[in-house]
Amino acid sequence: MMDRFAELGGNFLDTADAYQFGESEKIVGSWLQKQDREKFVLATKVGVPMSFDDPNSLGTSRKHVMHGVEQSLKRLQTDYIDLYQTHVWDNGTPVEETLRSLSDLVRAGKVRYIGVSNVAGWQLQKITDLVKYMGLEKVVSLQQQYNLLCRETEYEVLDVCINEGIGFLPWSPLKGGWLSGKFKRGMGAGGASSSRIGWVSEKAGERILQSAPSWDQYDNDKTWTLLEAMERIGKEHGKSVAQVAIRWLLQRPTVSAVIIGATKMSQMEDNIGAAAGWELTDDQMQELNKLSMPVIPYPYEMIRRANKMRKESEF
């Protein structure tokens, strides 16, 4: 599948040390040995627990970041990482310590650029302000969940990206399969029993995550109306529902690339087909924006309402 990905023009590979406790990095590293390394942008992450019984195996302390990058370099079989990202905000480590450690890695030549993932708006703004104040390497990217069923990150985070020139890398573009086009109104949870959504639905009593949505979370009229509009729009372009979902992201402000997670060759080829050669019209974008608009909480709704006569938000 990775050979086909490269054949179709894919060149951005995103993984993390915690994915399958290092096995994902090993797979990517082994594959890269047969490729021209310079043709690919290799990204990985640090911060999520690598072990559940070792307190030093998680977070973004200097100790763990320095150890983590060396281990990732070994598993990836490379002498540098193009984009090294914190996997999630670490409440247990001063962010100044993390940023200085990451900057040291850039200056040592082990990392080309640094990024962050899964942060709140105030955290991202603090990060960008600190790197300026401390004279550290700029954070160039943010990886965050973003899709037509998860737009809450627009409230502050994407505004920071726009204002600070940070590239945005959405993960879960299909919302765990909800935006894949596989599911139809009225089919019931049984239709998703063999999918990731079905698995999460069975585990709902012990685990419901926004990153792994259950059937009950989105089995409602708003979701089905959106999906039906996506199907209609896709037919107008000769594209799939999944391609419409990814194309919508690619046409959003500051989105640099979309993180896809296909498990089948056909899915990967379909996802790649969203990338070039066509665009959603302005009317189609506006329709999808309207149908997917979440309930805007206070104070964001009040700010938006009070500024109707001012410049409209990017979103």
Image: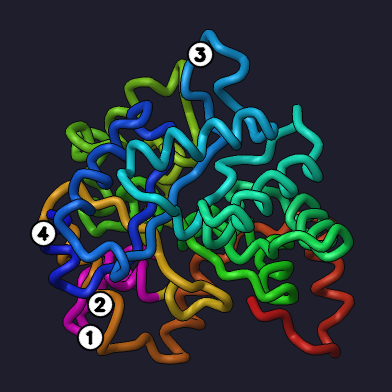
Q: Nearer the viewer, residue 289 or 46?
A: 46
Q: Secondary structure at mark 2?
A: helix
The residue that appears at 47% across and 23% down in the rendered structure is 50
Residue 159 drawn at (x, y percent) = 71, 70
Upstream in the sequence, badge 1 or badge 4?
A: 1
Q: Are marks 1 and 4 in contact (CB under 8 Å)?
A: no
Q: Is residue 241 left or right of residue 139?
A: left
What range of the chain is rendered magenta?
226-247
Is residue 221 at all visible to an observer of this figure? no
Disc 4 packing (10 Å; few <14; some 14–19; many ≥20): few
Q: Amino acid at mark 3?
A: Phe
Q: Which residue is identified by label 1?
A: 237
The residue that appears at 36% across and 37% down in the rendered structure is 74
Residue 188 drawn at (x, y percent) = 26, 39
Residue 168 drawn at (x, y percent) = 55, 66
- How far apart marks 4 and 2 lie (CA) works out to 17 Å
- How far apart marks 3 and 1 lie (CA) works out to 48 Å
- Examine the image and state in which quarter residue 233 appears: bottom left
Q: Which residue is identified by label 3?
A: 52
Q: Are marks 2 and 1 in contact (CB under 8 Å)?
A: yes
Q: Amino acid at mark 1?
A: His
Q: Secondary structure at mark 1?
A: helix
- How far apart marks 1 and 4 lie (CA) works out to 19 Å
Q: Which residue is identified by label 2?
A: 234
Q: Amino acid at mark 2?
A: Gly
Upstream in the sequence, badge 2 or badge 3?
A: 3
Image quarter of the N terminus: bottom left
- How far apart marks 2 and 1 lie (CA) works out to 5 Å
Q: Which residue is identified by label 4?
A: 266
Disc 3 packing (10 Å; few <14; some 14–19; many ≥20): few
